[in-house]
Image: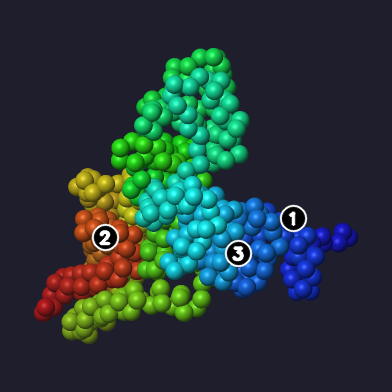
Amino acid sequence: MTAHKASPQERLQQAMRASDAEAIRACVSQLHPVDLAEICRDEMPYAALALLSFLGAAARAATFTELPPERQRRLAELMTEEELGDLLESLAPGARADLFRQVEAGRRQGLLRYLTAEEQRELERLASYPEGTAGALMTPQFVAVPETATVQEVLEVLQQHSDEAETIYQVYALDESGQLVGTISLRKLILARPSAPLAGYLTRDVLTVEVAAPQEGVAEMISRYDLLALPVVEADGRLVGIVTYDDAMTVAEEEATEDMHKGMSIGRLEGSVRTARPFELYRKRVGWLVLLVFANIFAGAGIAHFEATIEAYIALVFFLPLLVDSSGNAGAQAATLMVRGMATGEVRRSDWARLLGREVAVALALGLTMALCILGIGTLRAGPEIASVVAISMVLVVLMGSLIGMLLPLGLERLGLDPATASAPLVTSLADIVGVVLYFALATAMLGLPA
């Protein structure tokens, strides 16, 4: 039987338990920055700092970049000014600006002395863009050449600056004022005649985004048009950076996670679920849960209002959970489809009339199908009279739940709120209230009882 060979991560954990510095140094040198960052994320902050201290400047910067923002901020708080300054010096411009924004204002001026004058100007410019915008997301590391250059001159620029650029698959041509006039792919550049002017090979119809554009829109454009990188320009058209595909996918993942949390009435977590402290999880979840408790009081009030109906036909209570759950489930389904469609740009506010008609048709079909499923059980359990009430109620509550789930996200967007707030618990609670009132009101009317 072959003995289990320990992985570098397992050997590192063993070396840390044994406080074997040489073994730790050997293990961290073998780990990919992503794998080492995962370990640093789960260790206590001082232990994570100790692991980073075994790395060279470039490897330390690469590992630090892979850490979640909250962990970066915490480690930066524990670093001395010299340690933080050395780290800033090693980071790429975009990552440097991200870290600089997280550092306390009182420490920032002292850190600038670790950078050259040019790096300071670049850092201050990048850090000035608000969080969540294309300017904050972009990198200034791209290959730009004058539009008057020849193909050979562009190839020489690529050879000289390829190590500094985030990507060399697209080269950007600028006019004398720095405005973007066109792009050329690396493939087209390689196949072009070296002595030919670059201008004859440029693609001039270029998609761009302004620095103030929201990062969600940037990620959507990159995904929609299948771009490797999206140029970022100032209002006057000057090219100042690019957003790459991998940065856009990081944003998309963050937004999807945030929408999922909102969809279950959970606030945005600073770190990951694995590293979140119990009190943070409590604080993020308790607000909506308490609010929904009070919202569900209305469902209880609806039941109390129809006490006479319930006393006369106690069998109605048997079907109550089935009906309100069906209403809530239908509403949650509709809300999920709407929120996702709005997030991806497939659904717009102007589509509401067409979507409303389609949702009514679908909800009626769903309600009728579910009513037929329950009609036989209702007849056997409580007789045809009660079964008819339950079946008609099923159609109505599924219809109302579906309409709540479809219209609530559109209404929230109309009010300037995040449609993702139309969460499954919120929709379910509203649908429950409506379902209870509809069911007992219909039963009271159909069974000839006083209102």
The amino acid sitting under disc 3 is Glu
**Residue at disc 3, secondary structure:** helix
Q: Nearer the viewer, mark 3 or mark 2?
A: 3
288 relative to 257, above or below: below
Query: Residue 101 falls in which quadrant of the image?
Result: bottom left
Q: Nearer the viewer, mark 3 or mark 1?
A: 3
The amino acid sitting under disc 2 is Leu
The answer to whether residue 323 is seen in the rendering is no
33 relative to 141, above or below: below
| Left or right, residue 124 beside residue 365 | right
Residue under numbered circle 3: 83
- Judge by depth and name the residue closer to the eye, 244 or 402: 244
Mark 2 is surrounded, within 10 Å at the Cα level, by few (under 14), some (14 to 19) or many (20 or more) other residues, namely: few
Mark 3 is surrounded, within 10 Å at the Cα level, by few (under 14), some (14 to 19) or many (20 or more) other residues, namely: some
- Residue 304 appears at what percent x and percent y? 21, 83
Which quadrant does the N terminus fall into?
A: bottom right
**Residue at disc 2, secondary structure:** loop
- Judge by depth and name the residue closer to the eye, 340 or 77: 77
Residue under numbered circle 1: 30
Q: Which mark is residue 417?
A: 2
Query: Residue 294 falls in which quadrant of the image?
Result: bottom left
